[in-house]
Image (tube, rainbow, N blue to C red):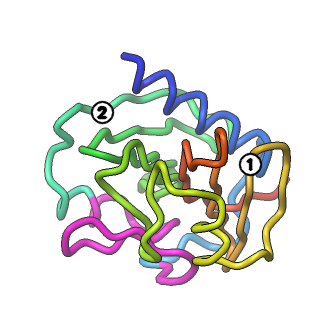
Amino acid sequence: MKKFWITALCIAVTVISLAGCGTASGSSAKNQQSGYIFTTGDQQIYINEDAQTVTDALGTPPSGTYEALSCAFEGKDTFYYYDGFTLQTYEKDGKKYIYTITLEDDTVNTAEGIKIGDSFAAVTKAYGTDYVAAGNTYAYSKDKMTLTFVMNNDKVSTISYSLLTSK
């Protein structure tokens, strides 16, 4: 239950601080293969990708799913709880798309090798210094998405990939 509330809080902070309530900018491509990529096993996951393709490939989430009315989009958001990460989707025109990927623990990492517990120096070595900082949160933007690192005592405590939205 603690994992759920931490995930929900991280997603809420990311959505509010980076996106606000609005609609997705641009079109929802079938597979927007751009921006930062999250890989788990042999599966590459892109923000704004067709969620059905991803969830079919990943199988049933071991820790289940959760649906809630969306603040940022019309319809519902669905959360898929896999080992080490959570996928959040949004609905558009009857289809679900990947909206946020949140890394939950050090069993998974970014494509560039950063995981929960790594130092801020490791983050800047992997991604550079072209970030936007807000308190202990560092956001890298690329191709209509943001990769965010939340730091706690110079250690990565949260990593999330998010779709940029506009009002």
What number is the disc on residue 137? 1
Residue at the image position 63 percent from the left and 54 percent from the top: 149
Reply yes or no: does residue 50 show up in magenta.
yes
Residue at the image position 77 percent from the left and 50 percent from the top: 19
| Label 1, label 2: how far apart the Cα atoms are | 27 Å
- Magenta region: which residues? 32-54
What type is the residue that disc 2 sits on? Answer: Thr
Kindly give the residue lying farthest to the top in the view shown: 1
| Occupied quadrant, residue 43 | bottom left
What type is the residue that disc 1 sits on? Answer: Thr
Q: Nearer the viewer, residue 114 or 13?
A: 114
Q: Nearer the viewer, residue 53 or 161?
A: 161
Q: Nearer the viewer, residue 78 or 61?
A: 61
Local crowd size for mark 1, using a 10 Å CA cut-off: few (<14), some (14–19), many (≥20): some
Local crowd size for mark 2, using a 10 Å CA cut-off: few (<14), some (14–19), many (≥20): some
Check disc 2 and report its element: helix, strand or loop.
strand
What number is the disc on residue 65? 2
| Occupied quadrant, residue 128 | bottom right
Q: Position of residue 21 (x, y in %)?
A: 77, 41
**In the rendered image, the vertical position of residue 19 relative to residue 46, given as above or below:** above
Q: Nearer the viewer, residue 120 or 27?
A: 120
| Occupied quadrant, residue 163 | bottom right
Whether label 1 touches label 2, CB < 8 Å: no
Badge 1 or badge 2: first in the primary sequence: 2
In this rendering, position of residue 149 left or right of residue 48: right
Q: Position of residue 160 (x, y in %)?
A: 55, 53
**In the rendered image, the vertical position of residue 30 relative to residue 77, given as above or below:** below
In this rendering, position of residue 44 left or right of residue 129: left
Residue at the image position 72 percent from the left and 53 percent from the top: 23
In what quadrant of the picture does the N terminus appear?
top left
Number of on-image labels: 2
Check disc 1 and report its element: helix, strand or loop.
strand
